[in-house]
Amino acid sequence: MTVTEAGTAAAPVPTQATCQSTYQTRVADYWNAEENPVNLELGKIDDLYHHHYGIGDVDWSVLDEDEVGGGVGGGVGSGSGSGSGSGGDRDDAAKRRDRITAELHRLEQAQADLLASHLGALSPTDRVFDAGCGRGGGSVVAHLRYGCHADGVTISRKQADFANDQARKRSIDDKVRYHHRNMLDTGCPSGAYAASWNNESTMYVELDLLFAEHARLLRRGGRYVTITGCYNDAYGRASREVSLINAHYICDIHPRSEYFRAMARNRLVPVHVQDLTAATLPYWELRKQADHLVTGIEETFLSAYENGSFQYLLIAADRI
Ligand code: SAH
């Protein structure tokens, strides 16, 4: 709160580095407080922290109750049969949980790899920009794949600090850096980036403002990629399920059409569009059954996809 010379309290002015609205402060509060096991337990496996969903076929054997001789057992037994005592049962349950956690992480990693594969031909001297970077996994994936420099920004100071710690532990902090900034107003240099992306973070901002910033950051011929949930214009308006997802995450899911309109207005020309809805359903089916990781939004995502009101989309565009 600033106080004028006359001593009266003025309305708060957004003077922080992030220049954020009250809404964005609430979003930052959410991510500063967020410690969901589905984000932390998966990330711990190999220190790649993703806060997005997964794609691809599930290895359903991870759900099997009985593990025989270290391999995955064939039957779906009750687990209460002969052999192990209660300690053994507990171990089996823990191993099953670990298998499910690892499988979900594999599917999230596949999603990150798919996004990275669309970033274009990058070299180690190129810079890439990760808008709404979460705990930083996406930038690490891009760096490991291309050797490039990466800048990630998040509205959550805690996430930026966490991600920078991770980069230091990997000794890649000379090339991969995270910043506590507003992705609509990053202060990063114009035309400096060969590629940029939003992985499940476009629903927190107005697309025109976001794409104007990407167009400013990207060099001519640079590549922009997003993977996002969007509502389906062909369904009509936002369904009940889409509204529930908005309330759960404090976000505002855009219709599919708005992506293409806003890109066209901001020098971003789509080169590849992929509907990942069918590819993400198995992830949600498995996650629904992961009692140790569920957040309570699983059934809503499944219904939203299944009733046709919601789609999981990848869009890659060239900056002209
Ligand atoms: N892209 C990451 C995280 C997705 S979660 C991943 O794939 O793992 C959504 C992210 O968007 C969070 O990190 C949140 O802090 C960020 N975010 C939301 N609004 C933002 C804004 N205005 N500026 C920067 N980051 C924002």
Image: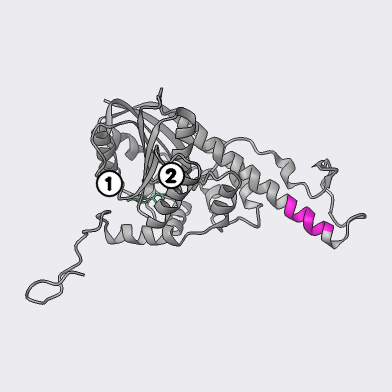
Q: How many marks?
A: 2
89 is within the stretch colored magenta: yes
Q: Is mark 1 within 8 Å of ligand 1?
A: yes
**Left or right, 100 with reference to 50:** right
Q: Which percent across, then down, holds residue 93?
A: 76, 55
Dot 1 corresponds to which residue? 184
Point out which mark residue 200 bears: 2
* Above or below: residue 79 compared with residue 272: below
The residue stretch that appears in magenta: 88-95
Q: Which percent across, then down, holds residue 101?
A: 64, 48
* Above or below: residue 111 compared with residue 184: above
Q: CA distance from mark 2 to mark 1?
A: 15 Å
Residue closest to the far left:
6
* Above or below: residue 236 compared with residue 271: below
Looking at the rendered image, the quarter that the C terminus falls into is: top left
172 is within the stretch colored magenta: no
Element type at mark 2: loop
Residue 217 in view: yes
